């Protein structure tokens, strides 16, 4: 990934691109932040639509991960480029996960189940992001249903 190629693809001059993003790292960080902001906005909409309950945050997180797995616009290139250019460029993602898992900590007895459900949903999301998922669409739906069944039984 070069700034020249990005400018060409975006239909702007390299100077115009550099005005807003003085380095490739600044551009990649902005891409990661933008994706995480959009993902969080979607999660908040799902949270509003989720019934009250002790595992509400986990349900919204899992639904968001499954919904995002089907998005046509995936952040694969930005995430890989960011990771390749410096793990610190993934800091917005790390902060997002720290905040979400902190929400799962209450009530404490539900934390392990919430964490397992979130990690399972996000693990599948990552496999889909990398186009590595071994699941058929039917298997994917069955896994999603099982995660919600477990959350519903506990909360």
Image (tube, rainbow, N blue to C red):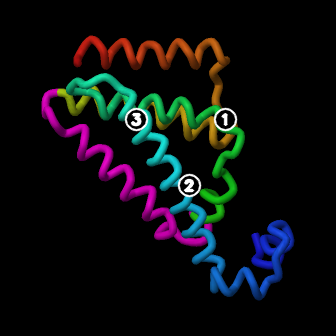
How far is the residue under mark 3 from the one under mark 2?
15 Å
Question: Could you tell me which quadrant the C terminus lies in?
Answer: top left
Q: Residues within 10 Å of mark 2 (few under 14, many from 20)?
A: some
The image quarter containing residue 67 is top right
Secondary structure predominantly adopted by residues drawn in magenta: helix
Q: Which residue is mark 2?
A: 35
Whether the residues at callouts 3 and 2 have beta carbons within 8 Å, the answer is no
Q: Is residue 22 magenta?
A: no
Q: Which residue is mark 3?
A: 61
Please state the horizontal and vertical placement of residue 97, each as a whole percent of the image: 37, 49
**In the rendered picture of this protein, how many numbered marks are placed on residues?**
3
State the residue at coordinates (24%, 42%). 103
Mark earlier in primary sequence (1, 3): 3
Local SS, label 2:
helix
Q: Tell whether 103 sits left or right of 14.
A: left
State the residue at coordinates (64%, 51%). 75
Q: Which residues are magenta?
A: 83-109
Q: Is residue 85 magenta?
A: yes
Q: Which residue is mark 1?
A: 132
State the residue at coordinates (60%, 57%). 79
How far is the residue under mark 1 from the one under mark 3?
21 Å
Q: Tell whether 75 sits left or right of 34.
A: right
Q: Is residue 6 above or below residue 150?
A: below
Question: Could you tell me which quadrant the N terminus lies in?
Answer: bottom right
Local SS, label 3:
helix
Whether the residues at callouts 1 and 3 have beta carbons within 8 Å, the answer is no
The image quarter containing residue 127 is top right
How far is the residue under mark 2 from the one under mark 1?
21 Å
């Amino acid at each position: 990934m070069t700034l020249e190629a990005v400018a060409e693809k975006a239909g702007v001059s390299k100077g115009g691109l550099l005005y807003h993003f003085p380095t490739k790292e600044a551009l990649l960080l902005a891409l990661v932040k933008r994706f995480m902001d959009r993902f969080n906005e979607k999660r908040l909409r799902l949270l509003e639509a989720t019934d009250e309950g002790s595992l509400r945050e986990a349900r919204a997180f899992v639904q968001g991960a499954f919904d995002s797995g089907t998005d046509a616009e995936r952040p694969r290139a930005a995430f890989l480029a960011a990771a390749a250019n410096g793990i610190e460029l993934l800091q917005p993602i790390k902060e997002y996960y720290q905040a979400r898992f902190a929400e799962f900590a209450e009530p404490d007895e539900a934390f392990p189940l919430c964490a397992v459900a979130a990690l399972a949903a996000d693990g599948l999301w990552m496999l889909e992001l990398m186009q590595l998922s071994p699941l058929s669409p039917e298997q994917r739906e069955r896994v999603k249903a099982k995660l919600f069944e477990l959350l519903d039984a506990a909360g």
